[in-house]
Amino acid sequence: MVAMSKKKHEKGAGSTPATVQLEKAGVAFKTYEYEHSNDHMDDGYGIEAAKKLGFDEHQVFKTLMADTGSERVVGVVPVSGHMDLKALAAAVGAKKAAMADPKVAMRESGYVVGGISPLGQRTKHKTVLDESALQFDEILLSGGKRGFSVGLDPHDLLKVLDGIAAPIGTW
């Protein structure tokens, strides 16, 4: 049996740069923890989170970093699909985008792959949330480390990150 918790966030509990940013912004959020295992990595970190926490894969989102040639941008898409790089580029007014090197993503975000959150990143980036998130009252995304997710209203996420919603996910 996997130990998991679903609780309203208490100040200081599971503190990461992501939760610190949410606390400073006064945004309501929940924390979700599960035991991360490398045994299920064929599906990916986000699918693992969805399965272990009992959430629909369309409601759990992954954070990906792309390079437009002039800047790096963050795309947040459901773990059930992929990011459409052309759509992401169009959303930020660029001609093209390619996935950023994982080492660059880790350095600029301050997080490890599988735990990258769009919140609390070391370097501020333009952020685009797939518009499918707006159908939910709560979405889950990485809280800044493997096995730790935060749940919040997608409108609050956009507000905190000064982000935009656009159709950047594919299934």
Image (spheres, helix red, strand yellow):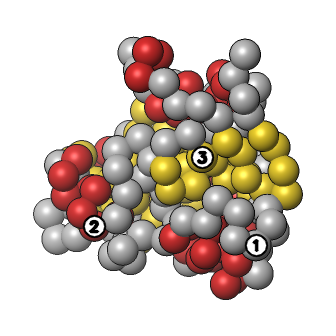
- In the rendered image, is residue 163 in sight? no
Instruction: Determine which quarter of the picture holds residue 158.
Output: bottom right
Distance, label 1 to label 2, CA atoms, is: 26 Å
Q: Is residue 131 left or right of residue 137?
A: left
What residue lies at 27% left-to-right and 56% top-to-bottom? 105
- Does residue 2 sit above or below 137 in this rendering? above
Among the two numbered marks 3 and 2 on one chain, the one whose residue lies closer to the N terminus: 2
**In the image, what residue type sits under mark 1?**
Lys
Residue 72 shows in this picture: yes
Dot 3 corresponds to which residue? Answer: 148
Amino acid type shown at disc 2? Glu
Query: At 22% across and 47% down in the image, what residue appears?
Result: 102
- In the picture, residue 82 is in which quadrant? top left
- Above-or-below relation of 38 to 101: above
How many numbered dots are placed on residues in this image?
Answer: 3
Q: Secondary structure at mark 3?
A: strand
Q: Amino acid at mark 3?
A: Phe
Query: Which of marks 2 and 1 precedes in the sequence?
Result: 1
Measured in 3D between alpha carbons, the distance from the residue under mark 3 to the one under mark 1, in whole angstroms, is 15 Å
- In the rendered image, residue 22, in percent from the top left (x then y), is placed at 66, 73
Which residue is under mark 2? 108
Q: Is residue 39 left or right of residue 159?
A: left
